[in-house]
Amino acid sequence: MTQEPAKIAAMQKEIIEIDLPPDVQPAMGMNMNLGVMKMKMVMYSPEAGTSLMLMQMQLAGQTKEQMQAAFNQQAGQQQNNRNFRQESAETKTVKVDGQDTDFMFAKGTLNPPNGAAKPVRMVTGMFPSKDGMGFIQYSIDEEKYDEAAVIKTLESIHK
C-alpha cells in the first residue's frame, strides 16, 4: 500500500492508460497477490468534488461474467462505504480501446459520515485492462458534472 504520488501513477499505468481529470489528486495505491487472485487499485481523492478509483483484477479460472460479479460486489461495497444513495441510473455505451463498453451512469446523494449530504453523479464500468479486467468508479459533485467530459475521460482508456 502506498500514498506516494509517483508510485500511484506507476500503478495506474500498470492497470490502464487514461487521461485523468485535472481535478483529482493521487490518494492511495494498493497491490495484492493472494495466489488465485491478484488485484491492483489506485484512488484519486476529491479536489473540487471529484474522486476516481481504478482497479484491475485477475481471478484464476474465472470467466468474464464471474469477474463482473466480483467487480459488482466490490463496487457495491465501495458505494456502501461512501454512503451513496442512488436515485436513478442508465447504461451508456462508450468506445473504450476500440470496443463498445457499457457504463452505468447513476445520479444520487452522497451521505458522508462526517459531513452534509450532497448530490453526486457516479459512473462505473468494467473493461479489459493490461493484465486482467479493469474497473472504474468515477464520482463527481452534481454542480460540477459534465457528461461530455466524463465520456471523453472514459474514451481515453486504453491498454
Image (spheres, grey):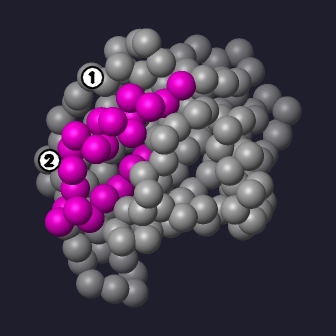
Q: Identify the residue shown where x is 82% and y is 40%.
A: 33
Q: Is residue 83 visible?
A: no
Count of numbered circles in the view:
2
**What's the distance in space between the residues labelled 2 and 1, CA to CA?**
17 Å
**Residue 114 higher or lower than 20, as above or below:** below
Q: Identify the residue shown where x is 43% and y is 47%.
A: 137
Work out which quarter of the rendered image holds the N terminus and state it.
Answer: bottom right
| Residue 97 point in image, percent of width and height | 47, 18
| Few, some or many residues within 10 Å of mark 2 (<14, 14–19, 20+) | few
**Residue 60 higher or lower than 52, as above or below:** above
Nearest the eye: 119 or 9:
9
Q: Which label belongs to residue 93?
A: 1
Nearest the eye: 44 or 37:
44
State the extent of the magenta-drawn residues as a range: 137-158
Ranked by sequence position, the earlier of labels 2 and 1 is 2
Q: Identify the residue shown where x is 42% and y is 52%.
A: 21
